[in-house]
Image (cartoon, rainbow, N blue to C red):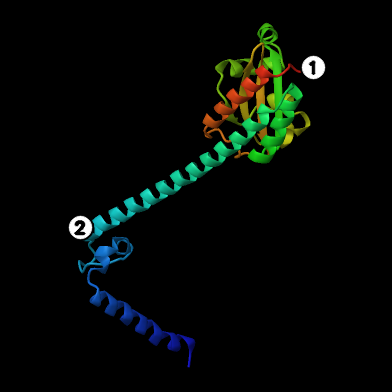
Amino acid sequence: MSLQHDDKPADTDFEQVVADYLIAHPDFLVRHPEVLAEIDIPHATGSAISLIERQVRILREQNQRMRDQLGELVAIARENDTLARRLHRLTLALIEARTFDEVLNTLQDELRNLFRADAVEMKLFSAEELAAHKLERGPAMFTDFIERERPTCGKLPAEQLEYLFGSQAAETGSVALIPLHAPPLVGVLAIGSHDPQRFHAEKSVDFLKRLADIVSATLSAVSSPGS
């Protein structure tokens, strides 16, 4: 006796059980409309599609789109919650920093561990010196970016990558670049990743703006580098 022959009566028995249950509980689909939404009930209209079928199909497509959108919103909410907890931990760690070197070490440790960064670099310049050398290579490459006071994500020109990351420039696929303002100093905080999509250009920078405020405030409260 083949397996197919053995399975057939079982399938038939199960279908009969389902049919008997629905007959005994005629309000089942009323109480569970989500089940009805997943069932195909063809109408005897030949090759044409009835108005009811078309409406059901549209409603199902709309329902699926809403499910997808809800899933995306839930994923974003979870990511934001994770980022908020990580930022809170970073803030507590920076509060304990007393010198520029401690700030830099804290940023490197926390950003690498909490935000999966492959490289973290911070460059600070004198605001007056930066203004005096606007056309020169080096810090002046970031003058316009610092003045806009808005973080950015994506790929950087090779010259900027080399200035920021040195020997790691070739391995850096994407960068989160954050402007810093800690008078009399200004600068940039660069978070690099080997993954080209880790800090893609469409990524929201709201979190990075809060990070810029926290790091800038911390730098204003500690001693200057080399002092």
Q: Looking at the rendering, in which quadrant would you find the C terminus?
A: top right
Choose top left, top right, bottom left or bottom right for residue 194: top right
9 to 54, vertically: above or below = below
Q: Decide if residue 176 is on the left or right side of residue 32.
A: right
Q: Callout 1, which amino acid?
A: Gly
The residue located at (59%, 34%) in the rendering is 88
Mark 2 neighbour density, 10 Å: few (under 14) some (14–19) many (20 or more) = few
Query: Is residue 170 in view from this perspective?
Result: yes
3 to 121, vertically: above or below = below
Choose top left, top right, bottom left or bottom right for residue 9: bottom left
Q: Nearer the viewer, mark 1 or mark 2?
A: 1
Residue 39 rendering spot, x and y as whole percentages = 31, 65
Q: Decide if residue 46 is on the left or right side of residue 76.
A: left
5 to 59, vertically: above or below = below
Query: Is residue 175 in view from this perspective?
Result: no
Front-most of residues 189 and 182: 182
Which residue lies most toward the front here? 96
Front-most of residues 145 and 48: 145
- Please name the residue that numbered disc 2 is placed on: 51
Choose top left, top right, bottom left or bottom right for residue 52: bottom left
Q: Decide if residue 42 is on the left or right side of residue 181.
A: left
Report if the CB atoms under discs 1 and 2 are less than 8 Å apart.
Answer: no
Q: Secondary structure at mark 1?
A: loop
The residue located at (56%, 27%) in the rendering is 210
Mark sitting earlier along the chain (1/2): 2
The residue located at (55%, 26%) in the rendering is 209
Q: Which mark is residue 226?
A: 1
Residue 15 rendering spot, x and y as whole percentages = 33, 79
Q: Callout 2, which amino acid?
A: Leu
Residue 28 rendering spot, x and y as whole percentages = 26, 68
Q: Secondary structure at mark 2?
A: helix
